[in-house]
Image (spheres, coloured by chain):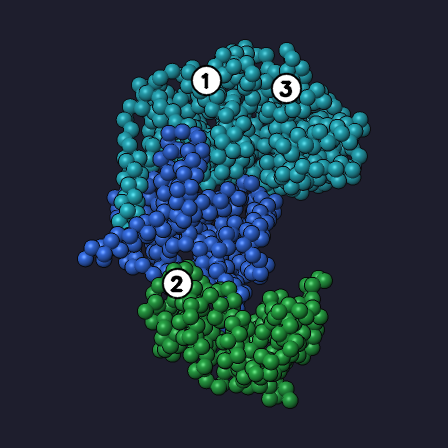
């Protein structure tokens, strides 16, 4: 069954000292699926992303990526296998331009050329991705001067440029204006089916509209899973969001 | 980047100006170099004070030339020395160099002087090869070699103190090697038995492991100076080793300003040098009183001061003898230096450019409320080769950590 | 990157004219400045691109210097063999030090390089049999090649100028390369560069070794310029001097470190003529400079130029 899944998280646990951030997480995402991941603050969503991306090592459990066990792989190896993610807090290189950031988007796992000018790393494909996200007029602006919304666009452009097989989006809409949010949703909707999507998002309207299935994380476990309609109707989930269920 | 270019050009013209500072032909310009800043500034300051006294005594002119003196700070750094010497030669038109003072800077000065041909009077710097295996025609020395005073001390320790087995603890570098080398040669010749050498890295502050495992002997010699020497001295007494074995020193142990910190425990400490501030000769008293008058009685003129004073006088005397600042006659006059009235006692230079002079065995005594090195025995006309033939001496390998051999029964000593 | 062609042309002009119009001492100061500019460049490659402040770059210069001195003087190797060996030995040290430091963060990197530098320094005066201890090794001379005496200050200057310029231009190319950009990215956000598929440790290691190689070349020139090798260039004060020059000139820029060295050397030459307290005077000047221009002179000039350019476009 693992072979068919783009992502399979099995029995993953992680704690920091006495603080349990994931106790027994199971999550299977099929290739091409759009999965929403919700839960209250502290439910362990970003921790789960960090474990999938390799920035955190789980204490227990296994993670498979298109049938391949990646639990012990480094961040860079997972990236090279086709795993991409964005961050809640923008983590770009603020001191240089948008174009230079884009030039860094596609690391190959090998040392980049010491001789080739960095400009040559920005090919038409990258420029097209940037254009799709409306970055063309801003290419030569320093990243430190970009608005929050544009930063999110650039984040997304950077990760899309790698053409990942699995894309982890960590609150992509946070802090965006209504218009920007609409644009973002259009882009996500238009992503090809080769890209499997897992998205953490607090904006319930957006999650319900974009996701095909939704997993609800609570106290470090998957509390409920189902299609948007099921989740929207789920009693327990409502309780969680109203703060009534305390385990 | 126009601004940066303007600034660079500004710097350029400033340097150019310095480069073209012309010197009039009727001056003799003496460049004095020593460590007047940094950890070794004691030596440089002593030299500077000695030179200042000599300047006052010599007056404004010599052989129709105005005397101009510039002091350069070596910072005790060979790299800085080379840079300052270059400045003397090509920027400041210096005619004669006095200094450098320290061992490493002396070698750097020699190396530079060999190429430049600059008449140079090295002052306190003591590596023997400056006036031996690496000597240069234009470089002479007003001071000494490390082995020189120890030739006398080795003999004295056997014959007068009766010590035949010595345990030496010393700083691990070439100057102490050279000191114990000279010591061993005469010590063995006089009937001594052995010197066990224990070396520690320079900058050691804790001697407990050395002191705890110190072998037995008739006496202990600390072959070094400075903060290492002070720490050793204090711990030697703290451990009570002084009750078991008397402590004697290498030439610099008691002689370069550490006596006030050592305190009364230093009383009776002995070593040897070509200078002792407890001298009572007429020439010395005159020098010391003039020095005190100029710099105050709190500052005792020690060997680096006298050597600076003497080196400067050698330089001026050579110009007077030569009648000009032309290098060749100045160098031959320098090499023929004889100074019967030097504060330390009479000396003349040997064929290799190093003084042949009195060596004083001195003992730390109290005089007028201060600790002073008082001569108790004088060995006259000691050369840098001791009693040995210069060519044969130089054919031997230079002294090192393990050379000459520590056991006096070694065949090496039969052949000497 | 800003267009720095005028700087390069100006620099070539100065380097061409300097030995022709200046006095001997100024030429020797020029040599010293270029040697230390290379060390400051070596420092700035790490500080400016990676945010890594190294206190052991002068140690690599010292290691290559000692190798030249030991092999050339003690073992009598020909210069043609000594020079490449010296650079290789220093690079080998850089490889080892690089492996030790590559995972360290900013402050621990500084402390590690301090410790490593001090170890090399201690070795230089305690390994007396090999290094000559405090006294060092003297009598190191450039060889005669094809009848050209490289010990002549002006010929030495010409050779050094060519090498220095080439190394700066090489680093310029490096800064503009994909690798150079990655180093900046690593300085800002190491984790992110990893997530973008870049080998962070390898890139830092390569940068460290390259910087070590630049310092190694500086060390070869240093020892031939001085004619002696002693522990002093390996001391902490020299490392701090180089750091100061780079910070003063602007270690984030290519030419800043050279500018800083030129200013420091000129300041020292001028001030030490007038007072023994030159270290204090220079210290004061530096304090003011760093307080007023924490990003270094070169960046201040750069901003000034940008502002002028901006106001020019605005008015047109």
Mark 3 closeness class: few <14, some 14–19, many ≥20 residues within 10 Å? many
- For label 2, the SS is loop
Q: Are marks 1 and 2 in contact (CB under 8 Å)?
A: no
Q: Is residue B196 above or below residue A188?
A: above
Q: Determine the residue positioned at 52% across, 11% down.
A: B289
Q: Determine the residue positioned at 41% across, 21% down.
A: B317
Q: Which residue is mark 3?
A: B373
Q: Which mark is residue B53?
A: 1
Image coords of residue B48 (percent x, y): 47, 24
- Image colour for chain A is green
Please tell me in which quadrant of the rendered image residue A46 appears: bottom right
Alpha carbon distance from label 3 to label 1? 22 Å
Badge 3 sits on which subunit? B
The single residue placed furthest to the left in the displayed view is C316
Q: Is residue B355 visible?
A: no
Mark 2 closeness class: few <14, some 14–19, many ≥20 residues within 10 Å? some
In this view, the residue in front, A100 or C272, is A100
Image coords of residue C97 (percent x, y): 56, 57
Q: Determine the residue positioned at 52% across, 46% down.
A: C234
Q: Determine the residue positioned at 46% across, 41% down.
A: B79
Q: Are marks 3 and 1 on the same chain?
A: yes
Alpha carbon distance from label 3 to label 2? 77 Å
């Amino acid at each position: 069954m693992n072979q068919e899944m783009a992502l399979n998280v099995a029995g993953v646990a992680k704690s920091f000292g006495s603080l349990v951030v994931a106790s027994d997480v199971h999550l299977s995402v099929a290739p091409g699926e759009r999965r929403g991941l919700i839960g209250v603050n502290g439910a362990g969503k970003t921790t789960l992303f960090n474990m999938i991306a390799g920035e955190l090592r789980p204490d227990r459990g296994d993670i498979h990526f298109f049938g391949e066990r990646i639990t012990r792989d480094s961040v860079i190896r997972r990236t090279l296998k086709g795993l991409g993610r964005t961050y809640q807090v923008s983590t770009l290189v603020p001191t240089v331009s948008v174009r230079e950031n884009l030039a860094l988007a596609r690391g190959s796992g090998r040392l980049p050329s010491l001789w080739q000018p960095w400009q040559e790393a920005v090919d038409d494909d990258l420029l097209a991705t940037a254009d799709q996200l409306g970055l063309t007029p801003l290419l030569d602006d320093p990243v430190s001067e970009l608005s929050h919304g544009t930063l999110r666009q650039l984040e997304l452009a950077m990760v899309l440029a790698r053409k990942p097989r699995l894309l982890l989006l960590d609150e992509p809409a946070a802090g965006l204006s209504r218009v920007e949010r609409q644009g973002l949703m259009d882009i996500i909707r238009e992503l090809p089916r080769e890209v499997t999507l897992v998205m953490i998002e607090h904006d319930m309207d957006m999650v319900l509209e974009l996701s095909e299935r939704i997993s609800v994380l609570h106290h470090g476990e998957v509390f409920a899973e189902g299609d948007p309609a099921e989740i929207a109707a789920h009693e327990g989930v409502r309780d969680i969001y109203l703060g009534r269920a305390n385990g | 980047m126009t601004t940066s270019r303007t600034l660079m050009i500004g710097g350029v013209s400033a340097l150019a100006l310095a480069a073209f500072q012309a010197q009039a032909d009727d001056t003799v310009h003496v460049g004095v170099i020593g460590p007047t800043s940094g950890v070794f500034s004691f030596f440089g300051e002593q030299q500077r004070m000695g030179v200042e006294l000599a300047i006052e005594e010599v007056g404004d002119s010599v052989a129709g030339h105005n005397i101009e003196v510039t002091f350069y700070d070596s910072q005790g750094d060979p790299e800085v020395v080379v840079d300052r010497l270059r400045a003397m030669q090509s920027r400041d038109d210096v005619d004669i160099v006095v200094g450098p003072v320290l061992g490493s800077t002396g070698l750097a000065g020699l190396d530079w002087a060999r190429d430049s041909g600059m008449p140079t009077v090295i002052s306190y710097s003591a590596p023997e090869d400056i006036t031996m295996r690496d000597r240069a025609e234009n470089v002479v020395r007003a001071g000494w070699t490390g082995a020189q005073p120890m030739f006398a001390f080795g003999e004295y320790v056997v014959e007068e103190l009766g010590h035949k087995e010595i345990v030496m603890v010393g700083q691990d570098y070439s100057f102490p090697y050279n000191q114990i080398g000279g010591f061993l040669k005469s010590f063995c010749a006089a009937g001594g038995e052995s010197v066990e050498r224990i070396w520690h890295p320079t900058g050691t502050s804790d001697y407990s492991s050395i002191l705890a495992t110190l072998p037995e002997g008739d006496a202990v010699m600390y072959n070094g100076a400075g903060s290492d020497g002070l720490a050793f001295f204090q711990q030697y007494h703290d451990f009570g080793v002084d009750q078991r074995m008397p402590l004697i020193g290498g030439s610099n142990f008691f002689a370069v300003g550490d006596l006030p910190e050592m305190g009364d425990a230093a009383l009776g400490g002995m070593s040897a040098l070509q200078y002792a501030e407890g001298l009572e000769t007429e020439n010395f008293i005159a020098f010391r009183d003039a020095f005190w008058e100029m710099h105050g009685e709190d500052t005792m003129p020690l060997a680096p001061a006298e050597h600076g004073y003497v080196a400067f006088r050698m330089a001026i005397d050579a110009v007077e003898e030569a009648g000009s600042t032309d290098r060749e006659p100045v160098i031959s006059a320098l090499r023929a230096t004889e100074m019967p009235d030097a504060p330390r006692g009479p000396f003349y230079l040997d064929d290799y450019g190093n003084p042949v002079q009195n060596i004083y065995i001195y003992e730390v005594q109290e005089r007028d409320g201060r600790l002073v090195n008082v001569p108790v025995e004088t060995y006259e006309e000691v050369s840098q080769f001791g009693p040995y033939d210069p060519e044969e001496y130089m054919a031997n390998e230079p002294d090192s950590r393990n050379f000459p051999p520590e056991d006096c029964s070694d065949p090496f000593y039969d052949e000497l | 990157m800003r267009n720095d062609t005028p700087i390069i042309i100006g620099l070539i002009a100065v380097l061409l004219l300097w030995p022709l119009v200046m006095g001997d001492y100024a030429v020797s100061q020029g040599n010293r400045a270029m040697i230390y500019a290379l060390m400051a460049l070596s420092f700035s490659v790490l500080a400016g691109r990676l945010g890594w402040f190294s206190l052991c770059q002068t140690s690599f210069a010292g290691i290559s210097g000692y190798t030249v001195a030991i092999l050339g003087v003690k073992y009598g190797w020909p210069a043609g063999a000594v020079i490449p060996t010296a650079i290789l030995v220093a690079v080998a040290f850089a490889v080892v030090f690089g492996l030790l430091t590559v995972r360290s963060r900013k402050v621990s990197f500084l402390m590690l390089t301090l410790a490593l530098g001090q170890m090399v320094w201690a070795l230089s005066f305690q390994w007396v049999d090999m290094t000559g201890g405090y006294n060092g090794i003297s009598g190191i001379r450039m060889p005669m090649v094809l009848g050209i005496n490289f010990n002549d200050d002006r010929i030495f200057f010409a050779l050094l100028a060519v090498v220095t310029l080439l190394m700066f231009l090489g680093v310029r190319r490096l800064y503009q390369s994909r690798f150079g950009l990655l180093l900046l990215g690593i300085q800002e956000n190491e984790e992110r560069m990893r997530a973008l598929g870049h080998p962070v440790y390898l890139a830092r290691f390569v940068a460290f070794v390259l910087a070590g190689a630049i310092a190694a070349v500086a060390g070869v020139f240093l020892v031939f310029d001085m004619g002696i090798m002693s522990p002093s260039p390996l001391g902490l004060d020299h490392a701090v001097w180089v750091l100061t020059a780079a910070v003063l000139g602007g270690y984030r820029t290519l030419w800043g470190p050279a500018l800083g060295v030129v200013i420091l050397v000129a300041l020292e030459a001028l001030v030490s003529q007038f007072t023994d307290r030159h270290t204090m005077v220079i210290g004061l000047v530096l304090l003011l400079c760093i307080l007023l221009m924490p990003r270094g002179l070169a960046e201040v000039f750069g901003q000034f130029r940008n502002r002028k350019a901006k106001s020019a476009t605005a008015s047109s």
